[in-house]
Amino acid sequence: MCGIVGYIGHRAAQPIILKGLQRLEYRGYDSAGIALFDGARIRLSKTKGKVSDLQEKINSDHNNVGNIGIGHTRWATHGVPNDTNAHPHYSNSGDLVIIHNGIIENYASIKKELSKRGYTFQSDTDTEVLVNLIEDVQKNGGFKLGKAVQIALNQVVGAYAIAVIDIKKPNEIVAARLGSPLAIGVGENEYFIASDASPFIEYTNDAIYLEDEELAIIRLHKETKIRKIKDDSLVSPYIQQLKLNIDQIEKGGYAHFMLKEIFEQPQAIKDTYRGRLLVNQGLIKMAGVEDNLEKFINAQKITIVACGTSWHAGLVAEYIFEDLARIPVEVEYASEFRYRNPVISAKDIVVAISQSGETADTLAAIKLAKAQGAFVFGVCNVVGSSISRETDAGAYTHAGPEIGVASTKAFTTQITVLTMMALRLAKAKGTISNSDYKRHLVELETTPTKVEQALKSDALSKQIAAVYKDVPNALYLGRGFNFPVALEGALKLKEISYIHAEGYPAAEMKHGPIALIDEHMPIVVIATKYGHYEKIVSNIQEIKSRKGKIIGIVTKGDTEVKALADHVIEVPETLELLSPLVTTIPLQLLSYYIAVLLEKNVDQPRNLAKSVTVE
Ligand code: F6R
């Protein structure tokens, strides 16, 4: 986690870095700092808190010098969030300054060695150890900055995206990565460094994404030199043309990114299936699937690995794949899979789902699956992300940037991609009739309109939120395809309003959670009109007899649940298999409004970060 930004060029560095850090706050926001270099002096300002607190600190420090600088927004790993542990960190001489996203796992032993040689440390961070190791290498070997960074990095174990400035090398920033993302924006006589492209998109569309174990020496008026950290070989930089535009990363009139992203879902789903779902021709065209169709058809099983909301999308996919394509599916938390000696073979397919494409556990799970011979398919949103590069093939969700920490459009677009995959495989395997296949294609194409209709529950969700905003606990129940939606609804409430919530399969309630129900407990029940409707109505009766408060998510026109529930939110009718795409909408809105009414920081909930690049 953590966001890093650097600038070297002809403009004042400070405003570019601060704005960039604000855009990267989704990666961490417990402290922030900046180092500015005017060619003679490096000045540093840092503080506990958000980038807005840093802005105030800079004003009081009168720190606005120079055309070179680096900045950092932190998600603490080593050392509590405070001013001292905030980045950037100086080396002992004060000549070097560093920012770092990642973890140096062997920092304790290096620190011990450096301490013996007289180095002292102000902070509890692993990063301060790294900058002093670089200084030590420089001193002992007389190396220039780039070489010293390279030698030092060969001694560390862990993950990093770093940028380093040396007072003796005006006009130069050295950057490197292993396991944490790092993009270099290439402008006219200027360079930007950042954890993703959002800090520099209004200045340039040209970007170099560093690969793992690469180090870049970025000099003003010179071409960037990239080397492999281990063997010192030169790499020719590949400059990508980015398609991102500035509107996509601004709030566009919405109070929060989360609300904007909830409302973007009709368009995001369309963008996901555009060019892939060809209803008139009766086709689904996904290059990554088509090129590997035989492998998918002959797969012994599909194992889905993911974390958090992406794991919930994986659970929905399990139901869809098994129902349509009759392929056995297992869904695993990536963090468990990677450490539990799973049985995976060359006959298996592993599908990794990740919005950011940077989640450390998912990345490690992919590497493990590949090492055991599995074919690994990625479903990612962020183009060029580590997971999209590490997988054998894949499909992007094309949801556009998701900035709110709570995932919303990532979930629905992941389900859209996975549904298209399942339909394509079902067709190829002959496990779906032609008429059913057609019906699903047509219905999937109308989903954006149905999501738009579901979004009309906005005002009602706000009213219901006002009734329940002060409860300490909530339950979410669903069955079949909507059981994972219940889990996702509970996660959304927990993470942004800090209200304890649990998702359960509705029938499982009587094996324990029913004991929690009394007149104070709100229970959100997804009770849309499908195969399990009668069963879920019985579950609602059971809740009712124990005086629980029921918020029913029902199909438009429903009367039965309406007669029993305290509140109902209607969603349009669709195929059961596609219903998670509409039922999840009111749950997102409900959580959003509860958090807003509780005055929580919706886009940046406490303790969380958007990209979880540590395990
Ligand atoms: C929840 C949320 C997280 C992520 C999880 C995986 O709203 O955002 O649970 O879903 O950290 O992240 P990705 O999908 O980027 O791998």
Image: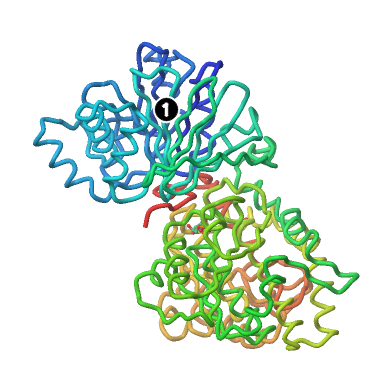
The answer to whether 48 is drawn above or below residue 423 in the figure is: above
Residue drawn where x is 73% and y is 88% of the image: 431
What x and y, as percent, mark residue 106?
A: 23, 49
- For the residue labelled by badge 1, is the local secondary structure a helix, a strand or a loop? helix
Visible in this render: residue 395? yes
In the image, taking residue 179 as reference, residue 441 lies left or right, namely right
Which residue is situated farthest in the left direction here?
Answer: 116
Q: Residues within 10 Å of mark 1 (few under 14, many from 20)?
A: some
Toward which corner of the image does residue 333 lie, by quadrant?
A: bottom left
Check the picture and name the quadrant holding the C terminus.
bottom left
Residue 572 percent across, percent down from the top left: 77, 68
Residue 243 versus residue 511: which sits nearer the camera? 243
Query: Colour mode?
Result: rainbow
- The image position of residue 487, as x and y in percent, is 52, 69
Which residue shows up at 46% across the image and 47% down it? 605
| Outermost residue toward the right in this view | 280
Judge by depth and name the residue closer to the eye, 189 or 22: 189
What amino acid is found at the position of numbered circle 1 in the picture? Asp
Image-based side of 546 in relation to 130, left or right: right
Q: Residue at x 29, y 50 (%)?
A: 157
Q: How many marks?
A: 1
Residue nearer the viewer, 6 or 57: 6
Q: Does residue 322 sit above or below 601 in this rendering?
A: below
Q: Position of residue 384 (x, y in %)?
A: 59, 50
Instruction: Judge by depth and name the residue closer to the eye, 107 or 596.
Output: 107
What residue lies at 79% left-to-right and 59% top-to-bottom?
274
Say whether mark 1 is within 8 Å of ligand 1.
Answer: no
Query: Dot 1 corresponds to which residue?
Result: 53
Q: Is residue 599 visible?
A: no
